[in-house]
Amino acid sequence: MVETTPGKRPLRVAVIGAGPAGIYTADMLTKSDAVKNGEIEVAIDLFDRYPTPFGLIRYGVAPDHPRIKGIVSALRSILGRGDIRFFGNVDYGADLTLGDLKEHYDAVVFSTGAVNDAPLQVPGVELDGVYGAAEFVAWYDGHPDYPRTWPLNAEKVAVIGNGNVALDVARVLAKHADDMLTTEIPGNVYQGLKANPVTDVHVFGRRGPAQMKFTPLELRELAKVPDVDLIVHGEDISEEHVAEEAAGDNNQVKVMLKTLRKWLEDDSPKTASRRLHLHFFQRPEEVLGEDGKVVALRTERTRLNDDGSVTPTGEYFDHEVGAVYHAIGYLGSPLAEIPFDLERGVILNEEGRVLDPNGVVHPGVYATGWIKRGPVGLIGATKSDALETITHLLEDVPTLVGAEQPEQDAVIASMEAKGIQFTTWDGWLQLDEYEQSLGASSHDAEGNPRERVKVVERDEMVRVSRA
C-alpha cells in the first residue's frame, strides 16, 4: 500500500527510453492500483535520444515481419491517450544529466535497452567481412546511427547464432530484394539488396535442433521464401542427436524438430538460385582470412551433454565464405552516472532498484527491460519486468515525494534554455503522417520503393516534426 495523501502533488516520473519497455512501464504506472484508488497521482514524461518513439520495434525488427512491427499499434495507442508526455531528440548524458532529471522528477526509470552486438571472441574477428548482426539489422531498418550503404559483396555467407535475430539476418540476406517490395523497406536498402550476389547463406548453431532459440513461426517462414532452397543435414538432426527426450514437454521444440525432419526427407530437386543451409552442433573456432579479408569460417563439431551443454569433439570443418555475421546476443551500453555491470551489459540493480557498486540502493533511480535484466525474453517478459520495477517504485513513494513540487513545464523551459530541439508527440504525428503519405505511392515507375523519411540528420528531423 502506498502511504501518501490523496490530492497531494503528483508523483513526477521520468522514463528514459521510449521503446516497448519504457512505454509499458509508463502505462502500467498510470494503471496501477495506487493510481486507480486515488492514493497518488502520477505525471510521467518519456524521453528518447531519437526523434521517434518505439525503439527496437522500429529499428530492430526485420521489415518483412509486419506481425511483430504491429506491436507499434499498441504502443501508439498508449502514447496517444495524452496522459504520458513524449520528448524525443533528447540524449541522456549529453542533453540532460542525472542531476537535471532529479531536479525535475521524483523518480527516474532507465529503459534504454541493449542495441550493441555481444562480441564474437574467436581469432579473425578483425578481418574485413566480419559484421555484428545488430549493425546489419540497424542498416536494413534505416537506423540513423548507421551508414546508408552496406558491403554486400559475398556470394557465400555465414551467420553464427540460433536465435530469431540470426534467422532474420539469414532470411534477409537470402531473400530476393523484389520480394521485399511489399514491406516498408527503405529505398537505399532495396538497392543494396538488389545488388547482393549471395548464393548460399549458412546458419551455424553450437548446440542442437532441440536447443534452438527461434520459434516455430520463424522457422516455418524460411520455407515460404521464394527461390530459396532449404538445406539441412542428416548428421545434425538424426535420431541420435535429437531424440524426443531432448525436447521434453516443450511442444514448440517438438514442432520444430518435426519441421526439420520434413525438410530433411524432402527429396525434391533443389533448383533455386539461392540456398539457405542450417547447421547444428557447429561451434565457431576461427575466421580465416587472406590479405585481410574473410575467406572461410572454421567450426568445431560439438556433442550434446545431458544438461543441454555441449562438448567439443576435436573435429574441425572449414566453410568457404566471404562474410561472417555473428548474432550471439545484444549488449547494453553504460550510462553516465549510473552504476553498470560491463560484463553483463546491464545497470546494477536489484529487481529494478538501481544499486551502487557496494550494493546500496540509489534512491529514486530504477531500471527496466533489457538494460535491467539483459537481452532475453519477448514482450511478455518485458511487461512482467516492468511490473516488478514499478511495484518497487510505488513501495518507495513515501521516500520519494518531498515538500518541494517540481513544476510540470520546468523541464521544457530547461531544455529550451539549453537549445535542445526536442520533438513532441504531436510533432511525431506530423512526421508519421508525412511518412504515410510517401507510402501511399510507395513505388516508382520502375517498381523501386520510394524513400521513406529517414532519420539521418537529427536537426532535419526535428524541423519536420516541429513544423
Image (cartoon, rainbow, N blue to C red):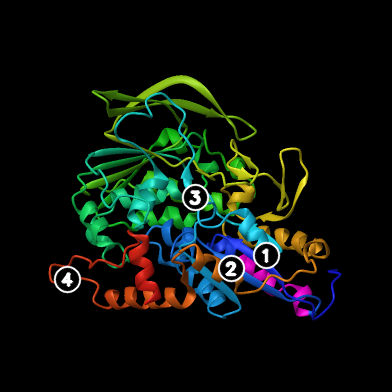
**The disc label shown at residue 444, or none:** 4
Looking at the rendering, the stretch of residues picked out in magenta corresponds to: 24-36
- Circles 4 and 2, Cβ within 8 Å, touching? The answer is no
Q: Amino acid at mark 4?
A: Asp
Q: Which residue is mark 2?
A: 411
* Other-residue count near label 4 (Cα within 10 Å), few / some / many at <14 / 14–19 / ≥20: few
Q: Is residue 265 left or right of residue 97?
A: left
The amino acid type found where label 3 is placed reads: Phe
* Helix, strand or loop for disc 3: loop
Q: Position of residue 59 (x, y in %)?
A: 42, 58
Q: Are marks 2 and 1 in contact (CB under 8 Å)?
A: yes
| Amino acid type, label 1 | Tyr
Is the C terminus in the top left, top right, bottom left or bottom right quadrant?
bottom left
Whichever of callouts 4 and 2 sits on the residue coming sooner in the sequence is 2
**Mark toward the start of the polypeptide (4 vs 1):** 1
For marks 1 and 3, give the CA distance. Answer: 40 Å
Choose the circle earlier in sequence order: 1 or 3: 1
Residue 214 image label: 3
The alpha-carbon separation of the residues under discs 4 and 3 comes to: 36 Å
What is the C-alpha distance between the residues marked 2 and 3?
43 Å
Please report the residue visible at 24 percent of the width from the left and 61 percent of the height from the top. Answer: 187
Q: Residues within 10 Å of mark 2 (few under 14, many from 20)?
A: some
User: In the rendered structure, which disc, 4 or 3, sits on the residue that comes first in sequence?
Assistant: 3
117 within the magenta span: no
